Image (cartoon, rainbow, N blue to C red):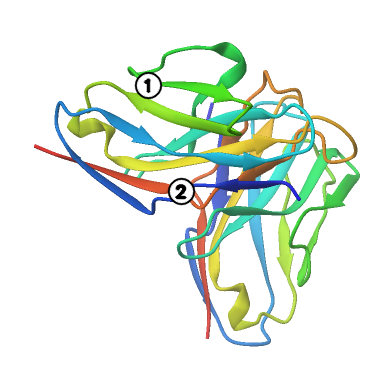
Amino acid sequence: NAGVTQTPKFRILKIGQSMTLQCAQDMNHNYMYWYRQDPGMGLKLIYYSVGAGITDKGEVPNGYNVSRSTTEDFPLRLELAAPSQTSVYFCASSYSKDYRYEQYFGPGTRLTVT
Amino acid sequence: AQRVTQPEKLLSVFKGAPVELKCNYSYSGSPELFWYVQYSRQRLQLLLRHISRESIKGFTADLNKGETSFHLKKPFAQEEDSAMYYCALQHRHGGSQGNLIFGKGTKLSVKP
């Protein structure tokens, strides 16, 4: 199993450009999450999904959109990129929201907006 | 408000010395608490969870509800313990059930 995969690994965007960060998992997990991590800060939840077709906002959703058309994929869309969105983005998945099931993380995407 | 505080950005110890990474939390109700670790060039992964009362790689963490703390301890640090450590709290109820709140992390450096 590849686990949670993310593409691209690195990206530089100009202000106002748009892009989609890809996330896929092959563990048949229902729950998927997008986090961002700014330098010196902890991870903050952007959006999450409890299953195909169901998404909800996390702590910092502004400037982002998500969709979940399949169990495996959970892309994150940035519209009109801004310098404040410079961050490392992590995707994660879990089988259940129960505490006994850990979240599995992807390797991250480092995004710079200039 | 729910919050996780890790007061130390960097903790540096010598090999064989005891290590304690501090974590304090603020949460209304009974929390589920975790320690996640990120080794160099590896992805973030679960180290241990308080409910399991387990010892992983020699690390233990005890939940102290009176002090609202969940400090991570190891009696004898090893060089391979060098990593970023994140304390995390999981929502237990409501629409956010299952979501994690992370602290800012502590970088542990174990010197030879």
Relative to B26, say whether A66 is above or below: below
Callout 2: chain? B
Callout 1: chain? B
In terms of depth relative to the viewer, which is nearer, A16 or B50? Answer: B50
Label 1 SS: loop
| Residue under disc 2 on the same chain as residue under disc 1 | yes
In terms of depth relative to the viewer, which is nearer, B91 or A57? Answer: B91
Label 2 SS: loop
In terms of depth relative to the viewer, which is nearer, A92 or B104? Answer: B104
Give the percent coordinates (x, y) of residue B33.
61, 29
Q: What residue type is labelled 2?
A: Gly
Give the percent coordinates (x, y) of residue A11.
50, 70
Give the percent coordinates (x, y) of residue B90.
70, 34
Look at mark 1 in the image and give the residue it sits on.
B59
Labels 2 and 1: the sequence-earlier one = 1
- Identity of the residue drawn at 85% across and 31% down: B93
Q: Which amino acid does label 1 sit on?
A: Phe
Look at mark 2 in the image and give the residue it sits on.
B105
Label 2 close to label 1 by CB (< 8 Å): no
